[in-house]
Amino acid sequence: MAWVLVAAFCLLSGACAQEWCVTLAPGPLAGWVGSCVTIPCSFTYPAGWTVSAVNWTRDGNQTVYHSDEARVRAAFKGRVHYLGNKQHNCSLRVAGLRPSDQGTYRFRFEVVGDGSSRNAWTGQPGQQLNVSAHPCQPSLESRLKPGPSLTCSVGANCSHHPSWYDRDGARPSPEQTPGGAGVTELQISPSQLDPGAALRCQVDGYRDECDSAQSQPLGTVPGTPTYIIGLTVVLVLLLLVGLVGVTAWSKMRRKRQGMSSTAHQPPR
């Protein structure tokens, strides 16, 4: 029986053959950069076999998930969660989507039977995943010139407007200057916010299913670079040391001149 199954695998690799099958969603799936996507998946196999290992690959050579975590590609560790089991559910969830995640994902399971018989099955043609930027996904940028500032921007096709919030969820008071193409820029001076203050960029009305806060992470408003502060302190200390040294040297010189003058006076 084992020889017949091996022959079937060679001839029908990837296609459903009798009770051997991997079922995926019809058509390609789409996900937004920074968001997440769930690839629904189920598989079947004949009675008498036990699943020993499962894995997902991207474009055939990148291991996205494996029962043996050591085989998982570093770029996917911590972002991929296997929602299935070793029975019939093989769904996969990929979080923090990146443009490089785009590709064809395939599920493969290995089975063992009576004695030493082994087999494996790979779902073909696989699940195509397309990754693109969401028009309402906010992006943060910080800069020091011409002054400390944070810039929050969204795509021109987004119908919602970004807003600024502090750590406590309150809308901050500094002025907001609307820009073109859906950009809102917040210029901050030291008198308005302390350097190092953190703000959150939130697009009202936009919800990312993977972001419970419905906003971008906190961005830190840049302040005076620490190396400039450190250099200033060093220069001040050197100046003080120099002044003390000059003052001490002047006193010693005057003292020596006084002693020399007294020594050369003629006796009366």
Image (cartoon, rainbow, N blue to C red):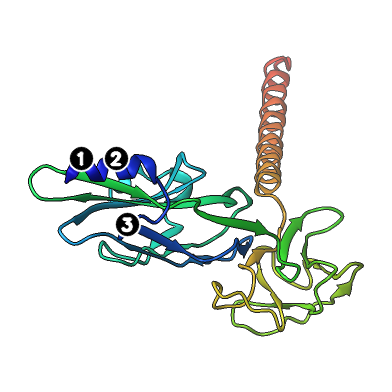
Which of these two is toward me, 37 or 232? 37
Of 220 and 233, nearer the camera is 220
Identify the image quadrant of the C terminus. top right
Image depth: mark 2 or mark 3 in front: 2
Do the residues bearing badges 1 and 2 touch, measured as CB atoms within 8 Å?
yes
Q: Position of residue 199 (x, y in %)?
A: 67, 71
x%, y% of residue 183?
84, 68
Q: Secondary structure at mark 1?
A: helix
- Estimate the x, y position of residue 220 in percent, counting from the top left: 66, 63
Where 231 falls versus 34 (above or below)?
Answer: above
**Amino acid, disc 2:** Ala
Q: Which mark is residue 7?
A: 2
Q: Which residue is mark 1?
A: 3
Image quadrant where residue 36 sits: bottom right
Q: Which residue is mark 3?
A: 20
Quarter where residue 142 is shown? bottom right
